[in-house]
Image: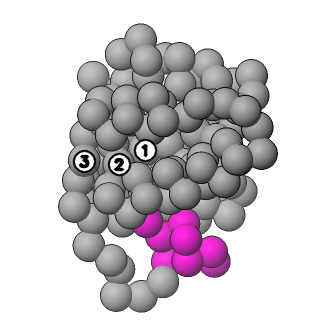
Amino acid sequence: MMRAIIDTNVLVSGIFWSGIPARILEAWGNVRFSMVISPEILLEYTRVVGELAAKKPIDTKAMIDRITLGSEMVAAPRFKKQACEDPDDDRFLECAVAGKVPFIVSGDKLLLKLHPFEPKNSQSTDQTI
């Protein structure tokens, strides 16, 4: 089964809006691929989803619980040197390297252009579906 890391922007867009990110989450829910996360990624998901849920009346606890229980958790050591322009993006590369995950799905142009470890495997949301 394909394994992938989902960037926070894709997760949030899929939870709160329709479109390609929602279809990506639906594909994960239908077990078309396995989501891989690290504790740092889960914390970011929880924080960002919680901030948006406070503004939109959507119960997101079930989705965070499903991600927690239904994803593969990997320990991802921090890089010694920052790899991305946005240091918050490093956690996705760290998880990919630590978990030997071949795909990062993101709409973040900085993350998409950077994946220095396997550039062919960073996919935009449009390429995923």
In the displayed structure, would residue 109 be above or below residue 23? below
Q: Please, what secondary structure does the residue beneath circle 1 have?
A: strand
In the displayed structure, would residue 74 be above or below residue 102? below
Foreground mark, 1 or 3, reads 3
Q: Is residue 88 in sight in this rendering?
A: yes
Residue type beneath disc 1? Ile
Residue at x 64% of width, y 24% of height: 22
* Residue 81: % across, % down: 42, 88
Residue type beneath disc 2? Ile
Residue at x 32% of width, y 56% of height: 38
Q: Name the residue carrying label 2.
A: 37
Q: Which residues are magenta?
A: 83-91
Q: Name the residue carrying label 3.
A: 73
Q: Name the residue carrying label 1.
A: 5
Task: Say whether residue 8 is left or right of residue 28.
Answer: right
> Residue 105 versus residue 19: which sits nearer the camera?
19
* Residue 128: % across, % down: 57, 28
Disc nearer the start of the sequence (2/3): 2
* Mark 2 → mark 1, Cα distance in angstroms: 6 Å
* Mark 1 → mark 3, Cα distance in angstroms: 11 Å
Residue at x 41% of width, y 11% of height: 30
